[in-house]
């Protein structure tokens, strides 16, 4: 398997075998890190990290992975560069590619990261766009495989806004790996028809399946993984909170949902999560709408079924694998 020079923009661009290769490489790098065996084979290289939206996990994962591999990194924050304001994406790509060996981009439309890659002669990695979050997928697949020992046949249900980056990406990831994906939400929040059809075609080949349902109980019955994400994503206007809380509350992951899922089911969330009032936005929403939790209850979040912090750690090992494989 040779992924040298490849961009990492969305899982649709990769075969199931290539994804498995990245997962195996991540597992190997994780193992070595735990044993204190250094893997700094990319010494002397440098990477640029563009963040037009904020981040904790993705930024830290990209920086630590770069450092572990022996590379330098430059973080460009949402306000501190010329990108988009005084300099086009095409120009930025050519400037950065002259100084760096790889470029990470987190921001808005998928078309921006695709354009960056088009004009960059070095690999570009998608650190989240409105449509896709592919590095998160590798971490999630690794976490699921660590937990159950395999991926093929695993039943995963996503609850909440399934037409955005997380719902889209999980549907693609499940289809690619022969897993059974269910989007459990109201019709308005189902993933786009064209993407559903594309994933159904992939699932036909891999033995997976795609299901869309509005019924929270049917959608989570006996599943292995219950997954959710925030109801309002970065970059969305404040005005949508009221509507989202009203429309997505029936799909909150709570004890009833986890009891309905398989006996050994796990709870997953890409994080950050609104599971209590201990954040500024959580507290504001609590006051405005008289709620104490949103997409997941604190009980489920803190329960033994929750693997969210394993998932977060795996962001670093999998991002390291993407860099090691493509550089
Ligand atoms: N899951 C995730 O991408 O987290 P950050 O927004 O903190 O990077
Ligand atoms: N859907 C969320 C994911 C955060 C990792 C967002 O885009 O804000």
Image (tube, helix red, strand yellow):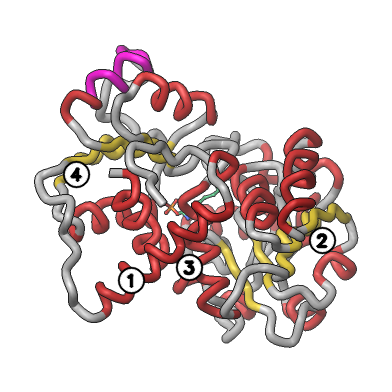
Numbered disc in front, either 2 or 1: 1
Secondary structure, mark 4, is strand
Residue that mark 3 sits on:
311
Tell whether position 138 is magenta. Answer: no
Picture layout, residue 155 above or below residue 11: below
Position of 96 compared to 281: left or right?
A: left
Numbered disc in front, either 1 or 4: 1
Secondary structure, mark 2, is helix
Label 2 CB sits under 8 Å from any ligand 2 atom = no
Q: Residue furthest left?
A: 44
Q: Which span of residues is magenta-colored?
A: 86-96
* x 14%, y 46%: residue: 72
Is residue 128 or residue 197 the one in the foreground? 197
Q: Earlier in the sequence, mark 3 or mark 1?
A: 1
Secondary structure, mark 3, is helix
Q: Which mark is residue 30?
A: 1
Q: Earlier in the sequence, mark 1 or mark 4?
A: 1
Distance (Cα) linking label 3 and label 2: 25 Å
Distance (Cα) linking label 4 and label 2: 43 Å
Distance (Cα) linking label 2 and label 1: 38 Å
């Amino acid at each position: 398997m040779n992924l040298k020079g490849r961009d990492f923009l969305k899982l649709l661009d990769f075969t199931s075998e290539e994804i498995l290769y990245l997962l195996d490489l991540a597992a190997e790098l994780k193992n070595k890190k735990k044993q204190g065996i250094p893997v700094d084979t990319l010494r002397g290289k440098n990477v640029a990290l563009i963040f037009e939206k904020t981040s904790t996990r993705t930024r830290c994962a990209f920086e630590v992975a770069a450092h572990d591999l022996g590379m330098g990194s430059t973080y460009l924050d949402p306000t501190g560069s010329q990108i988009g304001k005084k300099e086009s994406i095409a120009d930025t790509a050519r400037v950065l590619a002259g100084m760096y060996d790889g470029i990470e981009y987190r921001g808005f439309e998928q078309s921006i990261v695709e354009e960056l890659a088009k004009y960059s002669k070095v690999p570009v990695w998608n650190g989240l766009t409105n449509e896709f979050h592919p590095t998160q997928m590798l971490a999630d697949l690794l976490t699921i495989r660590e937990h159950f020992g395999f991926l093929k046949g695993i039943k995963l249900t996503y609850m909440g806004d399934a037409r955005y980056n997380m719902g889209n990406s999980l549907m693609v990831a499940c289809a690619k790996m022969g897993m059974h994906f269910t989007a459990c939400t109201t019709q308005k929040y189902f993933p786009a028809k064209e993407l559903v059809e594309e994933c159904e075609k992939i699932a036909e080949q891999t033995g997976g399946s795609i299901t869309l349902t509005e019924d929270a109980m049917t959608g989570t019955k006996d599943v292995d993984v219950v997954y959710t994400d925030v109801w309002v994503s970065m970059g969305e206007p404040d005005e949508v909170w009221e509507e989202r809380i009203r429309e997505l509350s029936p799909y909150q992951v709570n004890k009833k949902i986890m009891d309905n899922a398989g006996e050994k089911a796990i709870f997953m969330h890409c994080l950050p999560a609104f599971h209590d009032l201990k954040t500024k936005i959580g507290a504001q929403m609590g006051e405005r709408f008289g709620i104490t939790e949103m997409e997941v209850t604190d009980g489920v979040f803190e329960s033994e079924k929750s693997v969210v912090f394993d998932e977060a750690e795996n962001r670093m090992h999998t991002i390291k694998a993407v860099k090691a494989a493509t550089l």
